[in-house]
Image (cartoon, helix red, strand yellow):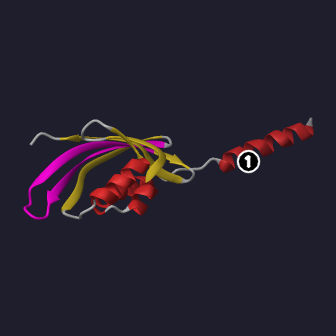
Amino acid sequence: MKNLEIIILMLCLFHFSCSEKIDYEAANAYILKSAQEWAEAINAGDSLVIDRIVADDFVGVSLRGDLYDKQTLIRESKMKANRSYKPKVFNVTIRFYGKAAVAQGNETWTKIADSTSTTNIWTDTWIYRDKKWQIVAAQDLKLNQ
């Protein structure tokens, strides 16, 4: 009986010592920084940033309402990269639900040549797994201007 109690105690200690505590303050800062980095990576066709931020099982909804995955995002950002816009992310709010986070915000894309711009509103769903935060779903909507 004593051995059983020791085994149960050890299992409980192991379970609680392996439970990873999430630093939500650091996660908030990372997600906020990553939102701007993602916009800049799309503009520049930087697949390394996209690969780090976006999960392999990611599914997004484009401004046109089309579904796209991570590989499509990387391929199209490389094809369309021209650095002719200056993206700015703003009004970002992030809410955490355990190992999930919902980030919502706006982004303005200003054309460098003539300063015309368009503004989108977006929602990104982040998941914490394998000791990192990544986007698993995203949806963008162009605001009427």
Towards the viewer: 104 or 74: 74
> Residue lying farthest front?
79
Q: Residue at x 18, y 53 (%)?
A: 108
Q: Quadrant location of the C terminus?
A: top left
Rendered image quadrant of residue 117:
bottom left
The spot of residue 55 in percent (x, y) is 47, 49
4 with respect to 98 (left or right): right
Q: Which region of the structure is painted magenta?
A: 100-126
Towards the viewer: 56 or 72: 72
Towards the viewer: 126 or 26: 126
72 with respect to 115 (left or right): right
The spot of residue 76 in percent (x, y) is 33, 53
- Residue 42 in view here: no
Q: Residue at x 30, y 46 (%)?
A: 93
Query: Within 10 angstroms of label 1, few (less than 14), some, or many (20 or more) residues?
Result: few
Q: Quadrant location of the N terminus?
A: top right
Rendered image quadrant of residue 30:
bottom left
- Residue 122 in view here: yes
23 with respect to 5 (left or right): left
Q: What is the magenta segment's predominant secondary structure?
A: strand
Vertical position of residue 49 compared to residue 54: above or below: below
Number of marks in the rendered image: 1
The spot of residue 115 in percent (x, y) is 9, 60
* Residue assigned mark 1: 14
Q: What element carries label 1?
A: helix
Amino acid type at circle 1 is Phe
Q: Is residue 83 magenta?
A: no
Q: Which residue is drawn at 67% across and 49% down?
A: 18
The spot of residue 132 in percent (x, y) is 51, 54
Q: Residue at x 40, y 56 (%)?
A: 50
